[in-house]
Amino acid sequence: MNLFGIVFRSLRQHALSTVVTAASVALAGGLLLTVWVAKSQSQATFTGVNAGFDAVLGARGSKLQLVLNAIFHLEASPGNVAWSDFLDVQKNPSVELAVPLAVGDNYRGYRLVGTTSDLFDKAQYAPRKKFTLSSGEWFDPTRREAVVGDFVARKMNLKPGDTFHPFHGLIFDEKNQHAETYVVVGVLKPSNTPADRVIWIPLAGIQRMSGHDPKAATDVSAVLVKLKAGSALAGFQLDMMYNKQGNRLTFAWPIGSVMAGLFDKIGWFDLVLTLVAWLVALVASASILASIYNSMNERRRELAILRALGARRSIVFAAIVLEAATISALGVVGGFGIYAALMSGVAGILRAQVGVVLNPFAFHPVMLWSPAAFIGLGALAGIVPAVKAYRTDVAHNLAPVS
Amino acid sequence: MNVFNPPNAPLNHDLQVKKPDPFLLRITGLEKSFRAPDGARHRIVEVPEFALAANDEFALAGESGSGKTTFLNLIAGILRADAGTIQLDGAAVSSFSESERDRFRATTIGYIFQTFNLLQGYTCLENVLLGMSFGAGADRAFAEALLKRVGLGNRLKHYPRQLSSGQQQRVAVARALANKPKLVLADEPTGNLDHKNASESLKLIREACRESSAAFLVVSHDREVLAQFERVGDFHKINRAFAAETAP
Amino acid sequence: MKPKLLFNFALAAAICGGCSKSEDTPKTEAVHKHEHKPPHGGTPVELGQDEYHMELVRDAAAGTMQAFIFDGELENFVRIPAGSFTVGAKVAGKEEPLVFQAVPNVATGETVGDTALFEARVDWLKATPEFDAVLKEITVRTKTYTNVAFNFPKGADAGGKK
């Protein structure tokens, strides 16, 4: 029987308090991991998702709103962009590809986005990755046809051949049904981007939908812009021209920086969440301390017996510290379970709401140092009761003096 | 010529082979005092001399408060004497540091307590193994054999709360002998047992000590217990501190 | 654990500090003669005591020169109502006029009478990478600047002011 044997039996003997204390550590650990990984992954993902484009050109307004609208298919667009502005940027010598987008309708809450075939033919939503179909074919730009993102297709049970009526606006309202009928001709393969969460239709579909302003029939909501490779200065020049020299349009470039700016602004929130997680960790450690310390009174005799059998003071001290660290370690293991559950929930919500995909099981350095920190905290918490055990008066705590 | 031992040179006593001490335990001038809550110091133990041979049995008769437990704790190294020497198996235990005394106790002494002092969170077998682990090391086979010897071969995985008092005492006996000690100390070993269990238990302890070649020192106020021993000492006379306290 | 928490605090403070737009940057206020980078990589010409700037960008192939009007920090474009202005350039001992015309731009919303961009087009620009020149007169908002001497592409510091 060694030190670990003594610790194991002590934990076994005080099973209930061990489980309760370990559970509080698990909660703290799971919370900390979730906050850290969710923030880090979502920041990386949000700043990394750009649908394969460098910039978004839109009506004068917030760059963030433009990017959220055109790339993440959230938010309303800040206004319309004239067709001539689209042609203008398209023929700019530094621009490799310009794709117009138009929004304004939905199907039961899922956004309809009008675009041209260029998005599917020419654009790469990720390096060397183009949009592909899992079934059906691409829409005919002259017909009322739709290609559905994978997530929408599964949620709404849409497949090639199905028909639907769009609804006006970006928020679903049963009363705003359009008369037009669209037929689903294709379903996209999952791209793990926000494109999975929308229904793609020809540009003219949005522009000429009944009830939409005919005077704006050639306007678009935004233009996705890809700059030519090697034209690093071009982005800067266009940014300066549209945003500083001009006052009509906004050029949101580079897309990643716009999103990074958002995370900078909510950096305080992340800090608060992290602080809360650490506070929970401290409370959990304090509960280890309290639980073991309070048990010291009942365990005086037990410790005296160990000492009477030949255990040195240092062994008894080490056993208590190790016991505290072990409770923490058990909590850490449970914490991973809580993290998996929480993070899966967070990932599911993000996927459904934003189309951004997180991976709860991807490695992050916090998964190494956080358990170490918790076990260290636990060991620290064990020191005070261990000192008490160290000072146990053996003779006094053995059988009564005869 | 042998310069180290020339002819007719007086014998160098330091070079002579020392005669082995016939006593396993030899105590001289032992003193121990405690401070009372009011700050006054009270001498609990004052034993000018005491000795016990190897393989010997000795019973110390004494009432409660006579300092018997303190005396046993001093021998076991659980307490440190204020003055005097304790020689045990050739080692000057009284001069050891605390950790040396702990280690020595684990390898040389077996201790049987009145209230058994088994660890409630350990099975019978684990209690015996624990007793071994601070000494020579755990020997599962030997621990099982000991428990079988004391009649608990079919209770290895039982916890103390699942045993009768008599059975618990037997586990304590097995634990005390687990490290093959040279000396077994017993402090009122039958104090918590009924008459039948008491006599069986005592018989078992004495037999087990003889089989293990361990000396046995027991303290008790029970006349029936004392009557079973050939050598009985009156602790009230051995411990001058008690005599001084109770002197008219 | 504790150093990481302190680091997080510091990082967050730095980030949140960076969020605030009202922060002063005193070091750019202290010295009069400080450098401004011309946004298009062209030649800056100071108007007044750093009150406004003009940035000149030559396109040798096309034989054109663009002039952008900026604020004192060379950061914000300043639109002026002028239809044109003239710069007298000394080329091979002769005075050659460079007439800058207002340039409308649909993309930026600039029109003649409300633009920050002017352009001159003349053949000799194609073969003349350097010359001395004098900006005859230009009015930016309420300030008029006359006879602003400069060298292209070296630029100038001081400028005349009415």
Image (cartoon, rainbow, N blue to C red):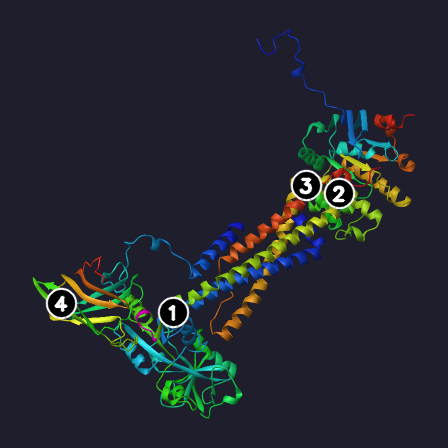
Nearer to us of marks 4 and 3 is 4
The amino acid sitting under disc 4 is: Leu
Few, some or many C-alpha atoms within 10 Å of disc 1 (few <14, some 14-19, many ≥20)? Answer: many
Q: Residue A67 occupies which quadrant of the picture? A: bottom left
Residue that label 3 marks: A390
Where residue B150 appears, as percent x and y from the top left, is 80, 45
The amino acid sitting under disc 1 is: Ile
Residue that label 1 marks: A255
Q: Are marks 2 and 3 in contact (CB under 8 Å)?
A: no
Name the element at disc 4: helix
Which residues make up the magenta segment? Answer: A244-248
Residue that label 4 marks: C125
Q: What is the residue that sits farthest to the left in this orientation?
A: C93
Q: Nearer the viewer, residue A97 or A60?
A: A60
- Residue A305, labelled with which disc? none
What residue is at 67 percent from the left and 46 percent from the top?
Answer: A385
- Residue B175, labelled with which disc? 2
In the image, residue A385 lies in the stretch drawn in magenta: no
The span from disc 1 to disc 3 (Cα, nearest Å) is 61 Å
Q: What is the residue that sits farthest to the bottom in this orientation?
A: A179
